[in-house]
Image: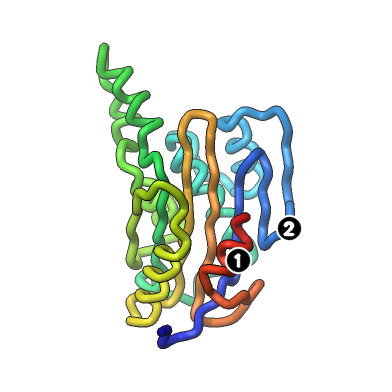
């Protein structure tokens, strides 16, 4: 039983070269490879942030999805410690791990080694938006919506945070799927009640 109401105030789904914001398609491209597609999203939805170009694909995907998610949703009403980031995927950082291992045969790449943990995407998001709240990255076979919503709701109910960016950020080779949700105790934006069923409807 929840002790506090919470709302989905923004959502962003990125898959199949399509960006869906709050249930509506806002961008669709065809025939673009993932690296170029993410670069085009960066150019369209973000300002100058040179570090973006050094990130691995998993971090770029989560980072750009967060840029779209937080558009027109200023977070300056919260202290840095008030907002958490709770994410999950199924491949961890395996795509980058494999590419890093290939470099070990000759000269190991420190630039790739930095990204051989999946939670680095949380770090990149947190640095960009100055977030210092609770964070966790889970590895599951599929997007376990009930688990994520239950985990986030518990943190909200106990006062560990007042807002949260949560969801699914999966990338392995050319396959990718990002589904991020901004959860807040206060109603604004799309203001959909925060339930597993609401998350599922926005994800499908």
197 vs 33: above or below: below
Q: Residue at x 47, y 48 (%)?
A: 169
Q: Residue at x 60, y 43 (%)?
A: 42
Q: Residue furthest top?
A: 106
**77 or 21: nearer the eye?**
21
Which of the two discs, 2 and 1, labels the residue nearer the N terminus? 1
- Residue 23 percent coordinates (x, y): 69, 60
Marks 2/1 in contact by CB < 8 Å: the verdict is: no
For residue 18, which quarter of the picture? top right
181 vs 138: above or below: below
Image quadrant occupied by the N terminus: bottom left
**195 or 118: nearer the eye?**
195
- Residue 114 percent coordinates (x, y): 31, 36
Q: Residue 155 bears which disc, if any?
A: none
**Residue 133 located left or right of residue 70:** left
Q: How is the image coloured?
A: rainbow
For residue 90, which quarter of the picture? top left
Q: CA distance from mark 2 to mark 1?
A: 11 Å
- Residue 33 percent coordinates (x, y): 61, 28
For residue 31, which quarter of the picture? top right
**Residue 98 located left or right of residue 181:** left
Q: Residue at x 47, y 61 (%)?
A: 145
Q: Tell me the residue that label 2 is attached to.
A: 24
Q: Residue furthest bottom?
A: 3
58 vs 79: above or below: above
Dot 1: element: strand
- Residue 193 percent coordinates (x, y): 58, 77
Q: Residue 10 bears which disc, if any?
A: 1
Image quadrant occupied by the C terminus: bottom right
Q: Residues within 10 Å of mark 1 (few under 14, many from 20)?
A: many
Dot 2: element: strand
Q: Residues within 10 Å of mark 2 (few under 14, many from 20)?
A: few
């Amino acid at each position: 039983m929840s002790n506090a109401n919470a709302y989905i105030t923004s959502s962003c789904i990125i898959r199949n070269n399509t960006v869906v914001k709050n249930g509506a398609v806002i961008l669709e491209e065809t025939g673009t490879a993932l690296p170029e597609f993410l670069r085009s999203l960066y150019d369209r939805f973000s300002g100058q942030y040179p570090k973006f170009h050094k990130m691995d694909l998993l971090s770029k995907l989560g980072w750009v999805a967060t840029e779209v998610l937080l558009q027109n949703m200023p977070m300056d009403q919260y202290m840095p410690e008030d907002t958490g980031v709770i994410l999950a995927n199924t491949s961890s950082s395996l795509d980058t791990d494999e590419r890093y291992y290939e470099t070990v045969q000759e000269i190991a790449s420190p630039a790739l080694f930095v990204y051989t943990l999946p939670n680095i995407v949380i770090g990149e998001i947190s640095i960009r938006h100055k977030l210092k709240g609770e964070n966790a990255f889970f590895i599951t076979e599929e997007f376990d919506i009930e688990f994520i919503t239950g985990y986030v709701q518990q943190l909200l109910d106990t006062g560990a945070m007042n807002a949260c960016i949560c969801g699914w950020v999966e990338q392995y080779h050319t396959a990718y799927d990002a589904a991020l949700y901004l959860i807040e105790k206060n109603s604004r934006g799309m203001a959909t009640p925060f339930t597993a069923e609401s998350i599922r409807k926005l994800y499908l």
